[in-house]
């Protein structure tokens, strides 16, 4: 004799309850996943800067001075960034060999080299790492585009125009380790200046780069990707949109600022090759003390 078994399914109310519970669990889980992902990104970013620090010291051991920029103030001149000189020192010698330092970074002869993305120069927290930078020489027509990078040096402080007291990075001098009399562990060498040439503020995209409507800088091969001096608080915005070119305030110099996509601050590479996390709330005076290489200031110990 066949017996029919009654199978009871979910009622609509039970199904809705299950869906609601799953939604709550997902809502609780996502912030934790995001925190873990950001912690991993911040560590990867720190490791990138550590590699650049090792490369910098190896360059110094070979040449007797730290890598700087070639960046005359005149438009249309040959310009070479410190990153290009470092290429052989962080396993990018193949790019260095095809780069011609006798012409500008934006010359067609350097197109293949400068369009190559460098993972060591990219912070993994940046929303759009595949963006490109353009040059003003052809009216920002993007004839030759350069892959971007998120790490910058700082020429100096804003104490007096144009740079105030000098930092480790220079476009006029061959800076030696012995020139950093404030102490290598007390002086910033590189900072994050992420997301350029697009304009970001407080973690959000404000304006994508288009024509002259851009932050001046962003390409890993461009000396204009470094920072003249820091005006804003850290992580407020990653730079200033050009007001003409040359710009009324910055001239032909970079318009970027210290900026990261990490919560609460930014990674910085110090002169001794160590990496620290710089809090967003650091005072202007403490930041300037960390930027100068020979200012004689009392630098903070808890930044």
Image (cartoon, rainbow, N blue to C red):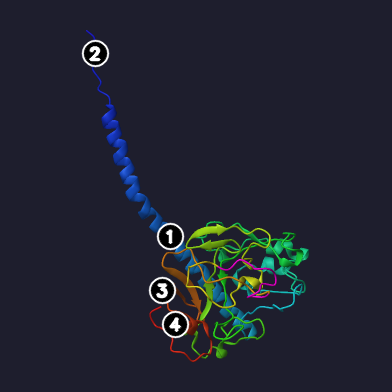
Q: How many residues crowd mark 3 within 10 Å: few (<14), some (14–19), many (20+)?
A: few
Q: Depth-wise, is mark 4 or mark 1 nearer the camera? A: 4
Q: CA distance from mark 4 to mark 1?
A: 27 Å
Give the left or right position of residue 30, taking residue 255 as reference.
left
Q: Which residues are the magenta region?
A: 239-251
The residue that label 3 is drawn on is 281
Q: Is residue 289 above or below residue 256?
A: below
Q: Which mark is residue 4?
A: 2
Q: CA distance from mark 1 to mark 2?
A: 56 Å
Measuring from the top left, give residue 22's x and y in whole percent.
32, 41
- Mark 4 or mark 1: whose residue is earlier in sequence: 1
Measuring from the top left, give residue 35's x and y in whole percent.
39, 58
Give the left or right position of residue 98, taking residue 83 as reference.
right
- Mark 2 or mark 3: whose residue is earlier in sequence: 2
Kindly indicate whether the residue at mark 3 contacts the one at mark 2 (C-beta within 8 angstroms). Answer: no
Local secondary structure at mark 4: helix
Q: Nearer the viewer, residue 235 or 40?
A: 235
Local secondary structure at mark 3: loop
The residue that label 1 is drawn on is 38
The residue that label 4 is drawn on is 286
Kindly indicate whether the residue at mark 1 contacts the one at mark 3 (C-beta within 8 angstroms). Answer: no
Q: Identify the residue shown where x is 77% and y is 74%.
A: 102
Q: Nearer the viewer, residue 45 or 295?
A: 295
């Amino acid at each position: 004799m066949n017996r029919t078994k009654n199978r009871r399914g979910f009622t609509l109310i039970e199904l809705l309850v299950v869906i609601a519970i799953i939604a709550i669990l997902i809502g609780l889980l996502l912030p934790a996943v995001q925190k873990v992902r950001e912690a991993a990104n911040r560590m990867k970013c720190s490791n990138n800067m550590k590699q650049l620090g090792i490369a910098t010291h190896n360059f110094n051991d070979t040449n007797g001075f730290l890598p700087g920029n070639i960046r005359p103030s005149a438009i249309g001149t040959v310009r070479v960034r410190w990153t290009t000189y470092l290429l052989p020192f962080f396993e990018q010698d193949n790019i260095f060999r095809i780069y011609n330092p006798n012409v500008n970074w934006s010359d067609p002869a350097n197109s293949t080299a400068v369009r190559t993305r460098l993972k060591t120069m990219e912070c993994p927290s940046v929303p759009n790492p595949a963006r490109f930078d353009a040059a003003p020489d052809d009216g920002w027509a993007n004839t030759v585009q350069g892959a971007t990078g998120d790490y910058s040096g700082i020429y100096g402080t804003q104490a007096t125009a144009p740079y105030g007291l000098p930092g480790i990075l220079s476009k006029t001098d061959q800076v030696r380790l012995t020139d950093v009399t404030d102490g290598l562990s007390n002086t910033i060498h590189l900072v994050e200046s992420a997301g350029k040439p697009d304009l970001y503020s407080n973690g959000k995209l404000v304006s994508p780069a288009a024509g002259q409507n851009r932050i001046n800088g962003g390409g890993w091969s461009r000396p204009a990707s470094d920072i003249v001096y820091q005006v804003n608080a850290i992580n407020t915005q990653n730079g200033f949109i050009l007001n003409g070119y040359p710009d009324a305030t910055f001239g032909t110099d970079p318009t970027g600022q210290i900026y990261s996509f990490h919560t609460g601050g930014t990674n910085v590479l110090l002169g001794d090759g160590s990496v620290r996390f710089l809090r967003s709330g650091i005072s202007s005076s403490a930041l300037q003390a960390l930027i100068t290489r020979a200012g004689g200031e009392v630098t903070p110990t808890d930044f």
